């Protein structure tokens, strides 16, 4: 395999000159550039990743940390990041929570893993990491962006949607369809974004005159299994309800599956609304009404901010992410309301 030294020798130039042509940095006459490029073509020279890193001073790699590598939520986010990085001639390195220790310890170890690989910058998605944890990056903390979490010390590097407004939108959708007997499957109380959406949801219902203190509310883990188990618990409780709000789509899908097995028709007997509007929502049975969070816009703004910081670019960054409810077949008026409308 040809090396940069072979290119320089064939072109009759110094190694530094050949390196400047390959990296595109530094002043080289057009005539000399032509000789070097002709040598590159003749030798079929392809600079290795290590060589490019030495020439540019950067690894051309962006590290991404996510808590788990599964499900319909994280995969589209990773796909968006990888696509944009490849278009920019960069590469993605992924770390996720594995090993012993709690979720916070796993997050810290994931960041350390990415730093040891020489990543130029980091995208971190975790609800449990603190300002203290980010301080381990030292000066490199300036080359970090955080998705779906706020950090007081690096507020300008944090990107998230307004989850309080997302909860409000879910409540308004149910109120518009005349639901008053509403149950909730929430995510973990330790997840700030979950707390925000649930607070927004309950606050809007309370503002409309509903007694949220008497509502059936269960806490689960954002998984389909959690949604299935909570829906079973809800049905066994005997509590009357005409609608169920789930704090993410995966729990809503689990609830839909249980209701189908239990012979409960959605939305004829019970309406279900999810959150995030992931790709799976449109293919649920029935298709799931869900609060649409523009995760792609949030992700790309965070990525652009990071690339601007790492490589001196001027890519567009926005912080306004409109939220809406994607209406599908899982939401309808309660049976009693439909009867009144038909009479």
Image (cartoon, helix red, strand yellow):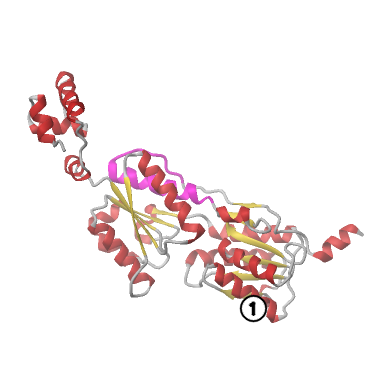
Badge 1 local density, few (<14 within 10 Å), some, or many (20+)?
few
Image vertical order of residue 107 relative to residue 35, above or below? below
Q: Residue furthest right?
A: 343
Image vertical order of residue 118 relative to residue 20, above or below? below
Image vertical order of residue 117 relative to residue 41, above or below? below
Q: Quadrant of the N terminus?
A: top left
Q: Quadrant of the C terminus?
A: bottom right
Q: Residue furthest top?
A: 31
Residue at mark 1: 233
Front-most of 325 and 139?
Answer: 325
Identify the residue at horizontal 43%, vertical 46% (top origin). 300
The majority secondary structure of the magenta stretch comes to: helix
Task: Classify residue 148 by image quadrant.
Answer: bottom left
Residue 275 shown in magenta: no
Front-most of 279 and 161?
Answer: 279
Identify the residue at horizontal 53%, vertical 50% (top origin). 294
Identify the residue at horizontal 58%, vertical 51% (top origin). 323
Residue 240 on image: x %, y % = 74, 75
Range drawn in magenta: 294-318
Residue 290 on image: x %, y % = 62, 57
Identify the residue at horizontal 74%, vertical 62% (top origin). 267
In the displayed structure image, the side of residue 245 where residue 121 appears, left or right:
left
Residue 36 on image: x %, y % = 16, 25
In the displayed structure image, the side of residue 343 where residue 189 appears, left or right:
left
Residue 191 on image: x %, y % = 48, 68
Q: Residue furthest bottom?
A: 237
């Amino acid at each position: 395999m040809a090396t940069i030294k072979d290119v320089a020798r064939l072109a009759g130039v110094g190694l530094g000159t050949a390196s400047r042509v390959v990296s595109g940095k530094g002043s080289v006459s057009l005539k000399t550039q032509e000789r070097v490029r002709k040598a590159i073509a003749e030798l079929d020279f392809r600079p290795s990743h290590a060589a490019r890193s030495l020439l540019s001073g950067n690894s051309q790699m962006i590290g991404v940390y996510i808590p788990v590598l599964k499900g319909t939520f994280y995969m589209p986010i990773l796909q968006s990041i990888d696509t944009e990085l490849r278009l920019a001639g960069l590469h993605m390195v992924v770390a996720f929570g594995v090993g012993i220790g709690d979720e916070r310890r796993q997050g810290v170890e994931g960041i350390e893993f990415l730093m040891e690989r020489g990543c130029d910058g980091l995208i971190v998605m975790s609800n449990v990491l603190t300002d203290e944890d980010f301080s381990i990056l030292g000066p490199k903390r300036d080359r970090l962006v955080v998705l779906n979490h706020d950090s007081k010390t690096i507020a300008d590097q944090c990107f998230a949607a307004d989850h309080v407004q997302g909860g409000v939108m879910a409540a308004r959708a149910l109120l518009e369809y005349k639901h008053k007997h509403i149950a909730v499957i929430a995510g973990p109380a330790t997840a700030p974004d979950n707390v925000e959406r649930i607070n927004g949801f309950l606050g809007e219902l309370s503002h409309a005159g509903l007694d949220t203190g008497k509502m059936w509310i269960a806490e689960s883990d954002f998984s389909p299994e959690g949604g299935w188990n909570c829906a079973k618990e809800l049905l066994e409780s005997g509590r009357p309800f005409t609608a169920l709000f789930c704090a993410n789509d995966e729990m809503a899908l689990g609830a839909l599956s249980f209701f189908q097995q239990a012979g409960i028709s959605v939305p004829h007997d019970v309406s279900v609304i999810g959150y995030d509007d992931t790709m799976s929502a449109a293919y649920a049975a029935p298709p799931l009404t869900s609060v649409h969070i523009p995760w792609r816009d949030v992700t790309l703004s965070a990525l652009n901010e990071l690339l601007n910081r790492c490589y001196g670019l001027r890519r567009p960054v926005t912080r306004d992410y409109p939220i809406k409810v994607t209406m599908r077949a899982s939401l309808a008026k309660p049976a009693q309301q439909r009867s009144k409308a038909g009479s």
